[in-house]
Amino acid sequence: QVQLMESGGGAVQVGGSLRLSCAASGTVIIMQSMAWYRQAPGKEREFVARVQMDGTMTYADSVKDRFTISRENNKNTMYLQMDNLKPEDTAVYYCNSMGLKEYWGRGTQVIVSS
């Protein structure tokens, strides 16, 4: 059974940094397209960043040059380094795995205060 477990969320001030982790079990992340999504209060879930099986990375325009997605294959873990955080980055961040099936983690809360 595939499980994705996010961690690393928290409360930071504007301009601060956080690193989110997504630990996968029941699947091998290098064989998947892995991504981060987020959902702010009252808004729909939106794409943040993706790393493809071949290592290609894509980002939403709103986070480009501030966020960095990466993966550590030997730990079967994906990361999202978030720098220069803004209040509009406040959301629950979800890990997503896309292969033959799609899986989601339960999310980790990020709060950015001014």
Image: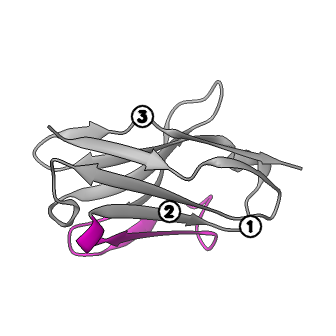
The CA span between labels 2 and 3 is: 16 Å
State the extent of the magenta-drawn residues as a range.
51-75
Q: Is residue 46 left or right of residue 24?
A: right
The CA span between labels 3 and 1 is: 25 Å
x, y (%) of residue 52? 27, 66
Q: How is the image coloured?
A: one colour
Mark 2 / mark 3, whichever is N-terminal = 2
Which residue is labeled 2 in the image?
80
Asked if 38 appears above or below 32 in the picture, the reply is above
Question: Is disc 3 in contact with disc 1, using a CB cutoff of under 8 Å?
Answer: no
Q: In which quadrant of the rendered view does residue 22 lie?
A: bottom left
Which residue is labeled 3 in the image?
106
Report crowding for label 3: few under 14, some 14 to 19, many 20 or more residues within 10 A (C-alpha).
Answer: some
x, y (%) of residue 61? 57, 61
Q: In which quadrant of the rendered view does residue 70 lie?
A: bottom left
Residue that appears at 89% across and 50% down: 114
Q: Is residue 38 left or right of residue 90?
A: left
Residue 52 on the magenta segment: yes
Asked if 76 appears above or below 45 in the picture, the reply is below
Secondary structure category for the residue under label 1: loop
**The N terminus: image quadrant:** top left
Which residue is labeled 1 in the image?
84
x, y (%) of residue 5? 38, 44
